Amino acid sequence: MEAKIKQEFNKRFNGEQGTLYASAGRINLIGEHTDYNGGFVFPGAIDKVIMAEIAPNGTDKVRVFSIDINEYAEFGLKESDAPEQQWARYIFGVCREILKRGGSVKGFDAVFAGNVPLGAGLSSSAALESCFAFALNDMFNGNTIDKFELAKIGQSTEHNYCGVNCGIMDQFASVFGKKDHLMRLDCRSMEYEYFPFKIDGYKLVLVDSKVKHALVDSPYNKRRQSCERVAAKLGIETLRDATKEALDAVRGEISAEDYFRAKFVIEEKDRVLAVCDALEKGDCETVGQKMYETHAGLSKDYEVSCEELDYLNDVAKECGVTGSRIMGGGFGGCTINLVKDDLYDNFITTVTRKFAEKYGHEPVIYPVVISDGARRVEE
């Protein structure tokens, strides 16, 4: 990928040379639907990246080429200069958000490509935003914008230029990622802590169902509203401060649906903390057990699973996989699996064959390694 980017950059911009930057996609080991409830998430950056070669061009224009979709875009840096192409709006948005914060951005040339799978819930858009935010901070601002602000620049780009009202987790993981470490982020205080994640004898692998069910009645908003109603009933700001005992005390005064939604969130908050403790002790069996509990909760209580994901989870269990769960919002997408090395090949063969027999297409397998986040690529 690096050689291809350099070759394209050289050809497109008259032999000039730029600097290479990269930022990563992410996984989230545990902590699903907890971010908007003030809870914890536990993501890590992965070895799938967006990489760009970038050089100042001495003008007030940005000229950028995407290798993967073979498209070129050119735009100015004023609010009225927004490009038509959706992919280019991510880069334009990052430029605008830096300028709004009083930072400096001047015209530049860029060529980028990536190997973060699209549509697999690995946050390719956050990787793109973080790559350019990190690069422009390095190139035009002497790295004076701190890392949290870079993550917020990516999040604001989604909100203001791409129409996605996302939380901070994806951009946070992409900017702060550290090789062989996961990060526990407190979504209320924004405090975070690194936890070593280099487990000998285990692999992490995603199994992508390639299924995305049509979502009617905005199910995410409905679940969020359930959580907010229960928090209001308990007299607290978010379910972060709720206990199972307090929830059970008001069970007769709320709908069954609201009860089960809140039950999942309260239990998931505790599971993230239990997984962190287990990892510190090297106890992978507990990590895996909690992953299975999360899947069951997302399937039965939060009701964001689907038949195909439940099937992938069942096959993982049959193959002796240590831990498996839906990763992401649900209704399709991937499972994330913690698998012992000696069971890995059999699991991949079995899950690919059985899923194809049942659903008529093979799932896509993505082995992942926990890696560094946004960075300058040393040549």
Image: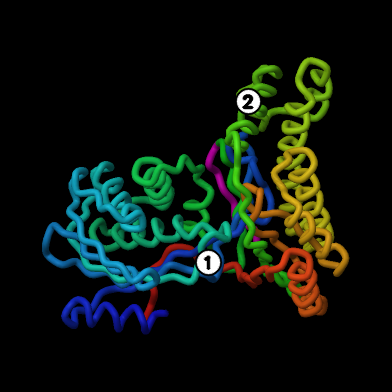
Q: Nearer the viewer, residue 144 or 329?
A: 329
- Residue at the left extreme? 59
Q: Is residue 108 magenta?
A: no
Q: Which residues are magenta?
A: 189-196
Can you identify the residue that label 1 sits on? 117
Residue 235, given in percent of the width and then of the height, sits at: 67, 17
Choose the circle earlier in sequence order: 2 or 1: 1
Mark whose residue sits in front, 2 or 1: 1
Residue 309, given in percent of the width and then of the height, sits at: 73, 56
Q: Secondary structure at mark 1?
A: loop
Q: Nearer the viewer, residue 354 or 322?
A: 354
| Residue depicted at x 78% and y 63% | 282
Q: Secondary structure at mark 2?
A: helix
| Residue depicted at x 63% and y 50% | 213
Do the CB atoms of the residues marked 2 and 1 lie less than 8 Å apart? no
Describe residue 234's horizontal placement relative to residue 311 as left or right.
Answer: left
Among the 4 quarters of the image, the one containing residue 4: bottom left
Can you identify the residue that label 2 sits on? 228
